[in-house]
Amino acid sequence: MKWTTAEMPSLEGKIAIVTGANSGLGLYTSIGLAEAGATVIMACRDPIKAATSLQEVREQAPDGTVETMALDLASLDSVKTFAVAFSDRFPQLDILCNNAGVMAVPYAKTRDGFEMQIGTNHFGHFALTGRLLDKLNAAPAARVVNVASMAHNWTRAMDLDDPFFEHKRYSRWDAYGKSKLANLLFTFELDRRLKKAGARTLSAAAHPGYSATNLGFVGPALEKSAVGKLAMSLGNALFAQPASMGALPTLYAAADAGVAGGDYIGPDGLREMRGYPKKVGCRKLARDEDLQGRLWKLSEKLTGVQYL
């Protein structure tokens, strides 16, 4: 059977956060969760884009309960402010979709001095998850879903001695690959620690295959590269699946009863480029427990957020 949103269980009474919800995968993840009855918090950096996206979700899921809250994952202060504001208002958190990300951008640093891609894609979400852990554990069966990528195969290794490319030449695609590998390392280490603590919260990951989103246009826009923009446009038009399809693995990981802690969900098509959700494998390095543990300790040190 091909899994679609028609197979989503009822999420009535559940509270969900989707980061990076103002376009692409995050937008369609928010729509799917709202259609299933969840109260959805669209956590977005840009308030203007967030308002437009909120209206779209409400049109697509008119019976849903949806709102936006400000969150900039490139700022640990913003992460803290968001977590405090959410925790003051809501008794629990049932679903945390760590979806937001940047891809293949020119070298830049976050407000805290992290290289932008791993700072946003990993360290911001690591801190957010930790600050919301009490609310996750207050739910009867919460889930953390980290959105990874096939790009975790595109880097040779993690470099935890120089995670921000301060002593080696910067490669935007290598940096992106490292950030996506970090997403998986974090997912599996979080799952192991949750199980060890006897928590009911589970940690899983998903990837969208090759999906048509705005993510790939940010780098060319920052570089003012017409060629890069054209390449992304052609790729999306010729090879990518719609963002609505790309969101299915995240929705499956967030809601399907068959998902277990440590699962990785991706498309079922050729080379996982497109298709319907299924459990997929990942490279051996992502399952390296020593590397997972070392990244976790580094993440605690750099973000100042310690948990489990």
Image: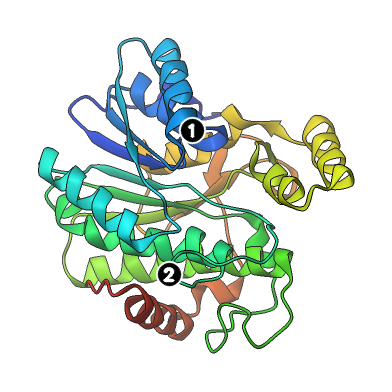
- Crowd tier of the residue under label 1, counting other residues whose Cα lies within 10 Å: few below 14, some 14–19, many 20 or above: many
Q: Are marks 1 and 2 in contact (CB under 8 Å)?
A: no
Q: Secondary structure at mark 1?
A: loop
Q: Is 87 drawn above or below residue 286 in the view shown? A: above
| Residue under label 2 | 112
Q: Is 282 drawn above or below residue 141 in the view shown? A: below
Residue ID at (65%, 56%):
150
- Residue 34 on image: x %, y %: 34, 23
The one nearer the camera, 263 or 175, is: 175
Cα gap from disc 1 to disc 2, whole angstroms: 24 Å
| Mark linked to residue 41 | none
Quadrant of residue 18 within the rendered picture: top left
Q: Say which quadrant the C terminus sits in.
A: bottom left
What amino acid type is highlighted by mark number 1?
Answer: Asn
The one nearer the camera, 88 or 160, is: 88
Q: How is the protein colored in the picture? A: rainbow
The total of numbered circles placed on residues is 2
- Crowd tier of the residue under label 2, counting other residues whose Cα lies within 10 Å: few below 14, some 14–19, many 20 or above: some
**In this rendering, position of residue 268 left or right of residue 188:** right
Residue ID at (40%, 82%):
298
**In this rendering, position of residue 206 left or right of residue 197:** right
Quadrant of residue 213 within the rendered picture: top right
| Residue under label 1 | 22
What amino acid type is highlighted by mark number 2?
Answer: Asp
